[in-house]
Amino acid sequence: MAVLDSTPQTARLVRAYADGVNAYIAHMSGSEMPLEFRLLGIRGMPKWEPINSVLLFNRMGWTLAYIAPELERALAASRVGATAAASLFPENSPIQEPIQPNGRKAPRFDFDGLAPPGAPDTATAPTVIAALDAFLPATRHVLGADEDARVFASNNWAVAPRRAESGHALLAGDPHLDLTLPSIWYEAHLVVPGALDVYGVTIPGAPGIVIGFNRAVAWTFTNTSADVLDFYTERVDDDRQPTKYLVDSVWYPLERRIERYRGARGETVGVDTMYFTRRGPMRRERGKWISMRWTVLERSNEPEAFQQAAKARDVDEFQRAMGRWFWSPAQNMLVADRRGTIAIRSTGRFPVRPGGGSGFGIRDGTSSANEWRGYLPPEFAPQARDPEQGYVASANQQPIDPHVAPYWLGGEYDPWRALRINQLLRADSQMTVDKMRRMQIDPGSARADYFVPFFLGSSRDPAARHAAGIDVGKLSEAVRLLGEWDRRYTRENKRAVLFEAAFRELVDRTWDELALSSSAGGSSPSARIVTPGSAVLAELLADSGSVWWDDRRTPRRETRDDILAASLVAALDAMRSSFGDPTKKGWTWSRSRRANIWHLLRLGSLSALDVPVQSGPSTLSPLAGNGSFGASWRMVVDAAPDELKAWGTYPGGQSGNPASSRYKNHVAGWAAGELEPLLMPKWIPDMPDSSTVSKLSLYPPR
């Protein structure tokens, strides 16, 4: 509650919000109890506490900022050694087209070659894995699924007036989160005459608009994917019942908290003692005490950030509000105003580590020299304002070119969507709202553009492929079929399925060194302890002689083209077995790629399942998690000087009642890539009846 005690305006805001929620709850009849509560056997609805609005952003931090590359490297090191692991999980993306423009008109490929696999690290890696697995959900790291399952995505971009047909700044954003019914977002227009007039979407529980626009400014976010979490080994006075920890030869008292865990009826089901150093929570794993420092657990005030940003009159005021109050989870905040200014800044708390170094590895907590030096000032964060190129864009790529950055932000980056966005924006100096809308479901793929030629080239030496035991007849057919693909993931195309199958085979056959079992035939080729990203695989493709191409499960020494050809032939066999004739409908992409918008209780009858969409891995509208993670809100804004105009949609509806016609009425339009006008009347009574479906009036109790 410290943030509420120290910030009176935030305290008033979240308490007023809680009072409103609780007033509604107090007057609910039994028949108004939400269906989910009845299904779960919950008889009374608990009150909403003011602190819950603050904790909501901590929960978003768990989703967006709980990134620990230390574990990925350790998992890889346990199979191929620390040097190779550092190549497979590098500190910087090998493909660079950063958020802050670097003056180039094309992406840069920093391909230095991967270090060869070495002897497994049996000393340090097991300890790191044991310690960090306790802090992190293991399913994020031990992967048997394809690479697409671990790619989370969001996009945003804005164009300057001189690159827009209308002569106004244009902004587009589509944050990608869990697709659920009811939706994570609730659309709202909040008006306090003379004080507030803002439209957009809010997360139920958040007292304000999170993404949206007012009469002067529009904004949207993508995740920075920065590493804002570090681990430290601690020395304590008593290994079993510690009371102190050592820093710089001085013993400091540990903070102890007794945590009680409650059951459905409020009964105590467990008790635990939590320990905290000045860095954060501490726990014992494999005989070592490990503490964690994470920006999300530190004091912040996001509710105030959104409240102040909603009142911004231009880009400068918006960025000042967010820079002062918004700290976690760090976001790439894109903003445009009616004066024609466009800007983007990676906003939040970014740790300054000793020597400007990276966050990889566990630090020695007994020395303060290993602690953070503070946080990066907002003026030094990756950013751009009205750049020469005439547009700004982010899609979870590395925010700043490491060649010019004097510091390390680090994290997990996906370059492909950023490459595609920049490609499209560079090619069109007359952007329109409708072009922006169509970009949000653009079926093109920079990833496919990069990988397909390598697959096609694998048939150039039939004799070598035959010597490798590959059926050159099937290879020729597979190359012919893949060559027919325009590398676009449109619903009706019949070749994307072949490429995706070949890509999965390539991943499986390439990273056999990372298999869960190292014995020959001891594991499925897809069961890996960890999987490098596709940008690293792209780097490997540039080195045809790398030892990584050799499949250790076979007696022969394979080459790059052997692996590519074998992957393509295996994919053809698999697709024929699953879908039959390549000319028939079974190969149609829309049969493989569907959105699944699950009800929060995973009840199929209350969900929207198998929804056909135009989407593909690393396109601007990818789906992950079996189709349940994607574009949760789409918005395009024309920041005209006289009046901002906006369009948007989301995969859900304004009602949480499954019996309501507005429970999922936006799903069909969302799936088709359509947007609806976002009406922002200056005076509600003036709205025509044709624009009004229903009215709900709420009055304070008398």
Image (cartoon, helix red, strand yellow):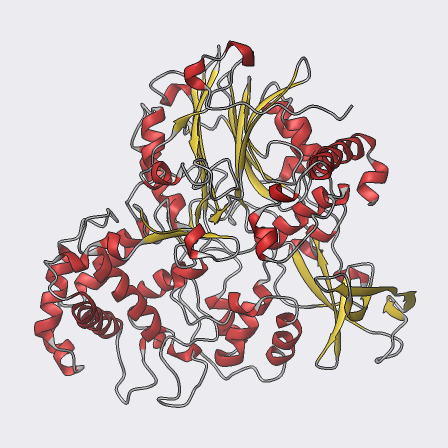
Residue 179 horizontal/vertical position (percent): 46, 49
Residue situated in front as seen by the camera: 412 or 697 = 697
Identify which residue is drawn at 87% across, 77% down: 241
Quarter containing the C terminus = top right
Q: Is residue 634 above or below residue 603?
A: above
Point out residue 212 in the picture as x, y percentages from the top left corner. Answer: 53, 29
Q: Is residue 464 left or right of residue 644?
A: left
* Left or right: residue 99 compared with residue 558: right
Seen at 52% across and 78% down, the residue is: 81
Does 632 appear above or below 225?
above
Answer with the quarter of the image where residue 190 lies: top right
Name the residue located 52 percent from the left edge and 53 percent from the top edge: 600
Question: In screen coordinates, is 259 left or right of 121?
Answer: right
Q: Position of residue 384 (x, y in %)?
A: 52, 32
x then y, percent, for residue 302: 69, 38
Of 609 and 310, nearer the camera is: 609
- Quadrant, the N terminus: top right
